[in-house]
Amino acid sequence: MSTPETITADVEAAVRQRLTTIPIFKTLGFQNLRLGPGWCEAFVPRQAAYDGIYETFHGGMMMTVADSLAAAAILTVCGAESRIATTDMNIRFLAPARSGIRVRAQVIKRGRTLVPVNAELWDESGALVALAQVTYMRLDAGS
């Protein structure tokens, strides 16, 4: 069975609506959100108010961005109304990000209970600055 390359307009609208209810999306200023089956892409501008010690995109904020987009990617395959929670995540920082970042999150596997996701983060010059893996638990999987 092949995976469709697009999601229906109804699914996309429902996921986008759900994301408007999540405060961090507004706080960090997610832009150019693109959704597909099991994936999500967006751009997040660097805000100096959230910089780390070296005047770069703060690593903790980069983790938050990866975590947030992982959730969005999961909602495209599990449903916008799904109840999900992060169980664990890790990130490998490869280079400082002195600009905004572009992020792509891709579901690795839609499990019955757990859904692992890969996230790649690039700076505005196209340099890969971090790789993350996030695992979510489907809280409503048994219902």
Image (cartoon, rainbow, N blue to C red):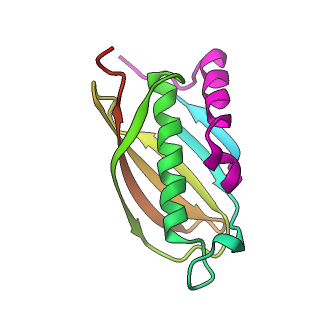
Q: Is residue 122 above or below residue 103?
A: below
Q: Is 95 drawn above or below residue 76 in the view shown?
A: below
Q: Position of residue 127 (x, y in %)?
A: 56, 68
Instruction: State the quadrant of the N terminus.
Output: top left
Q: Is residue 91 left or right of residue 114?
A: right
The magenta region covers 1-30
Q: Quadrant of residue 57?
A: bottom right
Quadrant hosting residue 21: top right
| Residue at position x 67%, y 28% in the image | 17
Residue 13 among magenta residues: yes
Could you tell me if residue 81 is visible in this image?
A: yes
Residue 38 in percent (x, y) is at: 47, 32
Image location (x, y in percent) of residue 135: 34, 44
Q: Quadrant of the C terminus?
A: top left
Q: Is residue 38 visible?
A: no
Residue 16 x, y percent position in the rendering:
66, 30
Left or right relative to 82: residue 111: left
**Nearer to the camera, 77 or 19:** 19
At 27% from the left and 24% from the top, the residue drawn is 112
Query: Which residue is more in the foreground, 133 or 84?
Result: 84
Q: Main secondary structure of the magenta part?
A: helix
Instruction: Name which residue lies at 56% across and 62% down.
Output: 122
